Amino acid sequence: MPSERAATKGAMARRSWSEAFAVYLHPRVIGMLFLGFSAGLPFLLLFSTLSLWLRDAEVTRTAVGFFAWVGITFSIKVLWAPVVDHIPLPWLTAVLGKRRSWMLIGQLGIVTGLLAIAIINLQAVMVVSMVDGDVEMVAPDRFWIVAVALAALWIAFWSATQDVAIDAYRIEAAPDDLQGGMAATYQLGYRIGLLAAGAGALYIAEFWPWQTAYLVMAALMLIGIVTVLVIREPESTRPAGTILEEDHVVAFMAARDHLSLRQRRVLGWFYGAVGCPFGEFFRRNGKFALVILVFISVYRLSDITMGVMANVFYDDLGFSKLDIANVSKTFGIFVSIVGVMLGGVLVARYGIMRVLLLGAILVASTNLLFAYLAIHGKDIWLLAGTISADNLSAGIAGTAFIAYLSSLTNRHYTATQYALFSSLFTLFGKFVAGFSGVIVDAEGYVFFFVYASLLGIPAILLVLYLMNHQRRQDAALSTAEGPAREQSPQGNT
């Protein structure tokens, strides 16, 4: 595996610019655009867009920050990824295949959750209080806030399930040399989904109730549903439902013949679905696997932490919903699309690791621009420049990071291993981000954005360490292959 990945990265680095751009013309690469849209649409509806709705309903910043913990659902999806990887869905798997059936069931779950959250009218249930004889609207009763949280949790669960299936499809549907392009078009579609859920929802909420915005977003999920029905199921090294028939699982069960058949089957399934994917990754990478996992957990920590309070920050500075929609959710998304496409080309041209380093530096440094904006105050042009720099860097970093995670997986355990990696990269970030509102309330926005920037330093240092490790591996591989070539007939001619 390491030598194959090194060869692939070398081939990618030797591509011409025209060959690098040509990856976007592959049908499978194009298809990822629509699946990315389906994955990106629910995200802002759970976080920044929902945060703004909650602030409109006078929910405190601290409570809004705690809503970030709904995102921990994405960080623990590894717990049910083996089910997505191995359990067929009645009738659906037979008709659509393993990956497409789970994508569809996840999308239907998202639709029902969006419809449920649209029923709740937070403005209508705000509490009326009297302050010095004046009527004042305060936050809704806790019951309704909990109801919104539960609906958001339901959406997050099914969105995470959809992500597991889409990630597995993306890796299995194309060879390694197309993974940079697959990651880029996935990110492009994802950003368009963010555009719809961000700017689109805010435009609607400016003129109609928030409930209307969420109903429209539920309708837009039809794009993903139609895509799943149109695309072809990728070839898989492991069909759904065959795990107990594999030789290593059969041997594992045979060694426990003192147990009942039912007990052996349960243990065998758990060993094959959970133990083998994790064990294979650690066997392949040895002790260095721990370094890789730490790197994954901190790479996006800086922008995940900053992103939770972004919309609240714009609102507190005095920008209107239309300002936020026009600059952050429309113009900013288009800039991020440029970053995503540029990231895909850079990965195809220069390889993954150098672009990972560039992305880590850009993400950490652009957070300081938000600190300057907090000092300067309301300025629409400064807001546009800050958001442009932030979204461009996030697009480059996101594409490189997805390609890197994809390169780590063994295609025999695609969904489970990728879910492990993607869970780690959000788990620590979402936990830390949950305290964002507390930090802002206690220290202010300038301190918060400097703090978010400093959180990016470990990622930069770890990328440098990984690059050095890869160079040592490549040098050792070249040294080992040199004598073999000299002893071969080709080497003697």
Image (cartoon, rainbow, N blue to C red):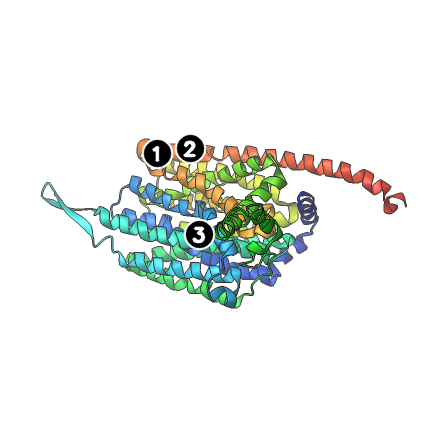
Residue type of the residue flagged with mark 1 = Ile
Within-10-Å neighbours for mark 1: few <14, some 14–19, many 20+: some
Label placed on residue 451: 2
Horizontally, is 117 left or right of 33 in the view? Answer: left
Is residue 449 visible to the viewer in this orientation of the structure?
A: yes
Q: Where is residue 269 shown, x and y percent of the image?
A: 52, 51
Disc 1 versus disc 2: distance between alpha carbons?
9 Å
Q: Position of residue 407 (x, y in %)?
A: 60, 47
* Residue type at numbered disc 3: Ala
Is label 1 or label 3 in front?
Answer: 3
Residue at numbered disc 3? 160
Q: CA distance from mark 3 to mark 2?
A: 28 Å
User: Looking at the picture, does residue 409 appear above or below residue 444?
Assistant: below
In the orientation shown, which residue stands out farthest toward the left?
Answer: 133
Query: Disc 1 or 2, which lies upstream in sequence?
Result: 1
Q: Callout 2, which amino acid? A: Tyr
Rendered location of residue 386, percent (x, y): 44, 43
| Mark positioned earlier in the residue sequence (3 or 2) | 3
Marks 1/3: CA distance?
Answer: 28 Å
From the viewer's perspective, is the residue at label 3 or at label 2 nearer? Answer: 3
* Quadrant in the picture for the N terminus: top right
Q: Which residue is mark 1?
A: 439
